[in-house]
Image (spheres, rainbow, N blue to C red):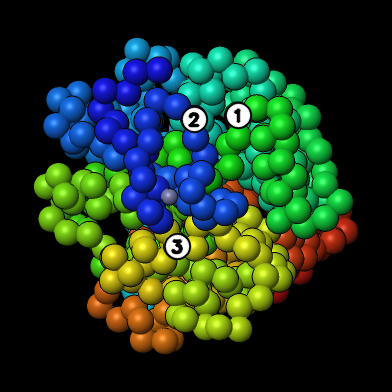
């Protein structure tokens, strides 16, 4: 594995520096997974290899390959992830009373933004000759990893909490993964996957700790910067679970700003569910933090986020903020996205829209501000939640009179 453009793997706590060509998950100097590592790049080298036009034509995230910690001679394991559209959303904007655009990440190959990270992770695992890839997940990371493992022809074993939505378990099964439903919470599934990684040496995709995974999520920031070059929004809005997605997005955007590709950076708004609000609470210095995780938005139902520090960094460095929203507001946002713009989101994917409403109410987002909401996941992932958001079907008699009585001129 040759990484000429990566200078170090650096501990975000103590600053210790490690060889980026080895696989290290966290800094061994600290207890547990506290010592989150981060890659450092030589931007001279990166720019030497980056000769793309920033013209908005984005085939896949591999347009930004020069920025990814992957050996330049390795073929990526790809399903065409990234390159998702940034949609104008005038009807949604009219409802929210604000200028809003939607980055639709539900269009990724397995239906979630996480495909950006999975593609990088499986590419690295395959190049390094790992026999098995694994992760713990509330569902989406598992399905995403399983899809890329199938594509890269590596066995995949995943740990999911017992109560993950069925739709989310069907997908990795079809991709051929072993799906181990842990009788317990996401946090228990996570701890088990870590113990197994240590004992068996499988490649662990857990984006919260695998420093290479979050690097893939930077490409959503690169794309947002490229797609908004002429019109950088005042705010970019992300849902937060473990917190690494908002951080990846921020780092990508900031990199493009530092390199002079865009003129400024947006403020980042992180949105959590009321029932799983640990990052929000830490950002606002609440000390009554508990680790329950109860929300209809299962993808962000994280009681003990592993990337609180990084997420808070993204929010504070960007002069951003954090808000929480209720499950009712999340389901209403799912319905609103569908009704106004034809965009089908799972609850976590719609959460940023609910967050915009909350932030407008709180005066965080001003009426003249422009906003990009990042819809992180597709509605097909969670049909049960969609049914609670969408309402009831109408049973009707198979007669034309029935239709006349509803839609006919005299009706
Ligand atoms: C994983 C996920 C998130 C949250 O990402 P974190 O990095 O855990 O904060 C949000 N939305 C969807 C659809 C996800 O799958
Ligand atoms: Zn350290």
**Could you say which disc has been placed on residue 35 in the image?**
none
Q: Quadrant of the C terminus?
A: bottom right
For the residues marked 3 and 1, what is the alpha-carbon distance in whole angstroms?
24 Å
Q: Is residue 58 left or right of residue 45?
A: right
Does the rendering let one see residue 124? Answer: yes
In the image, 289 versus 30, the foreground residue is: 30
For label 2, count other residues whose C-alpha is less than 10 Å away and answer few (under 14), some (14-19) or many (20+). Answer: some
Q: Are marks 1 and 2 in contact (CB under 8 Å)?
A: yes
Disc nearest the viewer among 3 and 2: 2
First in residue order: circle 3 vs circle 2:
2
Q: Which residue is mark 3?
A: 309
In the image, 284 versus 217, the foreground residue is: 284
Dot 2 falls on a residue whose secondary structure is loop
For the residues marked 3 and 2, what is the alpha-carbon distance in whole angstroms?
22 Å
Q: Quadrant of the N terminus?
A: top left
Percent position (x, y) of residue 107? 50, 41
Dot 3 falls on a residue whose secondary structure is helix
For label 3, count other residues whose C-alpha is less than 10 Å away and answer few (under 14), some (14-19) or many (20+). Answer: some
């Amino acid at each position: 594995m040759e990484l000429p453009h990566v200078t170090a793997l650096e501990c975000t706590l103590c600053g210790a520096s490690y060889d980026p060509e080895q696989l290290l998950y966290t800094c061994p100097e600290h207890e547990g997974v506290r010592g989150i590592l981060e890659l450092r790049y030589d931007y001279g080298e990166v720019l030497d290899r980056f000769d793309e036009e920033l013209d908005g034509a984005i085939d896949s995230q591999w347009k930004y390959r020069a920025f990814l910690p992957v050996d330049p001679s390795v073929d990526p394991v790809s399903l065409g992830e990234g390159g998702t559209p940034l949609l104008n959303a005038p009807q949604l904007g009219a409802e929210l009373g604000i200028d809003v655009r939607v980055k639709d990440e539900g269009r990724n190959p397995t239906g979630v933004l996480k495909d950006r990270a999975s593609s990088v992770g499986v590419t690295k695992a395959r190049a390094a000759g790992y026999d098995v890839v694994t992760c713990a997940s509330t569902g989406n990371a598992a399905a995403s990893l399983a899809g890329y493992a199938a594509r890269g022809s590596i066995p995949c074993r995943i740990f999911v909490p017992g109560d993950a939505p069925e739709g989310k378990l069907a997908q990795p099964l079809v991709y051929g993964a072993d799906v181990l439903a842990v009788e317990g919470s996401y946090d228990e599934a996570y701890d088990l996957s870590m113990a197994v990684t240590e004992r068996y040496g499988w490649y662990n995709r857990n984006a919260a700790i695998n420093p290479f995974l979050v690097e893939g999520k930077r490409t959503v920031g690169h794309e947002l910067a490229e797609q908004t070059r002429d019109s950088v929004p005042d705010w970019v809005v992300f849902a937060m679970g473990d917190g690494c997605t908002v951080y990846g997005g921020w780092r990508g955007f900031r990199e493009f700003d530092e390199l002079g590709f865009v003129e400024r950076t947006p403020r980042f708004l992180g949105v959590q569910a009321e029932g799983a609000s640990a990052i929000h609470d830490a950002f606002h210095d609440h000390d009554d933090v508990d680790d329950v995780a109860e929300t209809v938005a299962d993808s962000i139902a994280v009681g003990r986020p592993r990337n609180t520090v990084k997420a808070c960094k993204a929010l504070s460095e960007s002069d951003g903020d954090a808000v929480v929203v209720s499950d009712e507001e999340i389901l209403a946002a799912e319905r609103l996205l569908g009704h106004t713009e034809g965009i089908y989101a799972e609850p976590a994917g719609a959460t940023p829209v609910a967050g915009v409403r909350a932030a407008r109410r709180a005066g965080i987002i001003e009426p003249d501000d422009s906003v990009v909401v990042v819809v992180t996941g597709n509605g097909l992932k969670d049909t049960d939640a969609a049914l609670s958001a969408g309402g009831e079907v109408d049973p009707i008699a198979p007669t034309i009179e029935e239709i006349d009585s509803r839609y006919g001129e005299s009706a």
